Amino acid sequence: MVGNEFARILVPMDGSDYSKRAASKAIALGKKLDSQIVFLTAVSSAAVPTPGQMLGILKDDKRLQKAMHELICTIRMEITKMLKKQVADCEKAGIRADYEVLEGEPVEAILGYAQKFKPDLIVIGSHGLSGLSKVKALGSVSRNVSELAKCPVMIVR
């Protein structure tokens, strides 16, 4: 990898079409540049209200905690499955890849992980799942990551 300025690529994913396009772009780059890719997802329990919570039904703290725990576990399992598929696709293409599932607010989790991983490039979708229903503007996560990251950020539409 001598001379590869993008040897380490970080790809935050949330399962949206935009993040899947970003993953495809990162895989294509990784293959051409012999890069290592890490796929990252941040799960925020604050961003995932239970149906009972939305309807005001769950008032019992223990029932609410149990419902939230079960929901987060299910989400983590689905996310892990999605990320493992991305890693398997990379390995089939001869690309070194790994994945991480973190808990926390997405921007903070992405930037915090980036401080440790020290990517040469972050490839992120222009809109996430929460951005699909908003006015067509750059998603808040991708915008904040692009403004605050210490490395180049490629935003994929």
Image (tube, grey):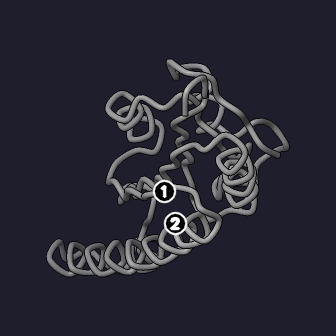
Q: Quadrant of residue 75?
A: bottom left
**Horizontal side, residue 47 vs residue 139: left or right:** left
Task: Give me the disc on residue 97.
Answer: 1
Q: Position of residue 27 (x, y in %)?
A: 67, 54
**Horizontal side, residue 140 vs residue 68: left or right:** right
Q: Residues within 10 Å of mark 1 (few under 14, many from 20)?
A: many
Which residue bears the numbered disc 2? Answer: 87
Provide the secondary structure element on which disc 2 rests. helix
Q: Amino acid at mark 2?
A: Val
Quarter holding the N terminus is: top right
> In this view of the protein, which residue sits in the foreground, 57 or 144?
144
| Marks 1 and 2 in Cβ contact (< 8 Å) | yes
Q: Position of residue 102 (x, y in %)?
A: 34, 54
> In this view of the protein, which residue sits in the foreground, 1 or 90?
1
Q: Amino acid at mark 1?
A: Ala
Residue at screen point 77% across, 43% down: 156
> In this view of the protein, which residue sits in the foreground, 61 or 40?
40
Provide the secondary structure element on which disc 1 rests. strand
